[in-house]
Amino acid sequence: MHSRFPRQWPITLSLILLFIAGNASGEEGPPPRPLTDPLLVKSQSLSRPLVPSVEELFAAKDAFGAIWIDDGETILATANLDGPFNLWMLDRAGDGPRPASRSPDRQLNPVALPDRKRIVYETDSGGREMYDLILLDLETGAERNLTASPDTSEIGAIGSYDGRLLAFSSREANASNFDLAILDITTGERRTLVAEESPGYRWVPVEFTPDGKALLANRLNVLQTDGTMMLVPLDGSAPLPIGPSGEGVYAIASDLSDEGDRIAFFASGPSQNRRSGLLSLDTGAIRWLRSSPWPQSGGWFVPGRSDIAFEENASGRSGIFLYDAARDESKPLPLPEGMNRFASSGQSPFTANGATLLFRHQAGHQPNDFWTYSMVSKSAAKITELSPAALDGNRLPRTELVHYPSKDGLVISAFVWIPPNLARDGTAPAVVMAHGGPTAQISDFFNRDAIAIASRGFVVIAPNFRGSTGYGMDFQRANVGDLGGGDLDDLVAGVDFLVATGFVDRRRVGIMGGSYGGYLTVMGLARRPEVFASGVDLFGILNWQTLLASTEPVLQVYVRNLLGDPVTNAEQYERSSPSTYIDRIEAPLLILQGENDIRTPKSEATALQARLNERGRTVEAVYYPEEGHGFSRRENQIDSLTRVVDWFERTLKAQP
């Protein structure tokens, strides 16, 4: 919801029906990337390199989903300042953080209602991902569960301009699709506005129209290959598609202008990267904000102006650009290198007067903090100190972005952490980190796992293998039907690159990852035992058929899109499953798993542990109660990373 309140809604529904869908426009991907000379990868010379304990790394707090709750002095954010992710108020004046709400469970994605005194946020229970919407009064601290539905998940809420209605996405526990629903906060009356019938599709509300008669929303699929912007009348009439459309077009609205006549959005087509655009509801005309080979976000209107701020992701490093509507040009904001992202994805990052932008900044060696950018002085400043001064990023291993060829010549981008003061004598152990998804991307964020491992003498590489986002749709779809094939080759090619730097001993290479990264870990140990000498599997996948039968419904649709029908393509499921090659595993394996994981259930981990035990392999497993897909409780985060570090110390550094 925007920070200002438009005075009128000039567009009638009949005019929108006259729109002729445009074509999505974007640069062909993946972008050109020159290959990196391995011998140019260097180790920093530091007089006092820092080797932080795992506890010290977690003293750097995480915070996200921040929104302004006044005119520029106080923000409300989700943060793990003293344990679980709860809501905290942070003052830029330097006053200490104050808890807004406390719970042992996660509290996520706060949005402010127009009075800024009431907040709506999401919470689940024990990692089950069945979220309820909670109304919080910031003045009294009183809270009310607006949905109270243990077997229905409600997420992504936005409020109407009069503060009376909420719109949100809603999914039953046994469903793979999200409906669009609205709720009257005062009466508690709830109704489904749009009932989605297609498996794997989701409705996401963006903003109410100023007259309160309609809702701007997106309809998109789980693979992010089909997305349409929709205007949804609140009287129950049929939704109306607007903007770019067509086969393979993914168009997503992000904001509505103050006047209610323009939409900020992004769109991509087949073989095209996402590109930020501006849609006029008066004429249907589309203006693309910047020509670039890199993917962009939809962005936010600057209150009181026609300008738009949007993000661009250049191979895992994100910058913020400002589109000047009067000049029809976009320029990057002068921000520090690394990851610069809007503070919230659900509410405008600007103050009401448009003078200040709130964003998050972090980098591979720099912990996350909130920053502001002044639209007046055109300068950025850090406004929080979420990490202790002793955790000096200048004394930690830094990330280096590299590009190398895979087995078939496909260019792969990766981040590398080289320990300081490392001799180029070919004796260092290394760890390959595989990200989840696979439709995800490793980016230049503060990576505790990589820092903990690299600061102890391991070279770490985190590749964006085929199937990753950020390099065009062809690259993103390049592992469909070939899971554990070309993407695993990309990881192995990363090992070859590390060896070519002259730092790494090929016999001392480990692999780790979570979710799909856990799958690639087990697949790597099984199919390339000559490459990987140790592994850590965090909530990974053993067998695609058993996963399909036990995972939650949305992921079932996702798996079918990656591997096809499980009956027709049974051979492909078998070929892509680590269980097929389990007899080949010789290396020791550590398994870390949440008891309540609904995506990759505990049964995948227990079956893997049992089969390795039957074969007399070295395997250890830890199962965390009250945890789901990933670990949200501080004690479990510290315990799991401590075990990872100790595991690689024992299994790789002890190698002859």
Image: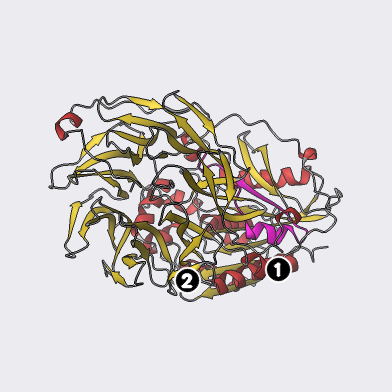
Stretch in magenta: 443-470
Q: Is residue 628 visible?
A: yes
Which one is in front, 277 or 374? Answer: 374
Q: Is residue 451 magenta?
A: yes
How many angstroms separate mark 1 from mark 2 (CA)? 23 Å
Would residue 488 be counted in the magenta stretch? no
Task: Name the residue that disc number 2 marks.
Answer: 627
Q: Nearer the viewer, residue 480 or 261?
A: 261
Q: Residue at x 65, y 66 (%)?
A: 644
Q: Residue at x 50, y 55 (%)?
A: 577
Residue 82, how many percent across, how many down? Answer: 54, 72
Of marks 1 and 2, the one in the foreground: 1
Quadrant, the C terminus: bottom right
Front residue of 16/617: it is 16
Other-residue count near label 2 (Cα within 10 Å), few / some / many at <14 / 14–19 / ≥20: many
Q: Which mark is residue 444?
A: none
Where is residue 508, by image quadrant?
bottom right
Give the residue type that dot 2 points to.
Answer: Glu
Q: Which residue is mark 1?
A: 53
Coloration of the structure image: secondary structure
Residue 599 found in image quarter: bottom left
Residue at disc 2, secondary structure: loop
- Whichever of labels 1 and 2 marks the residue nearer the N terminus, that label is 1
Q: Going by the image, does 420 lie left or right of 287? A: right
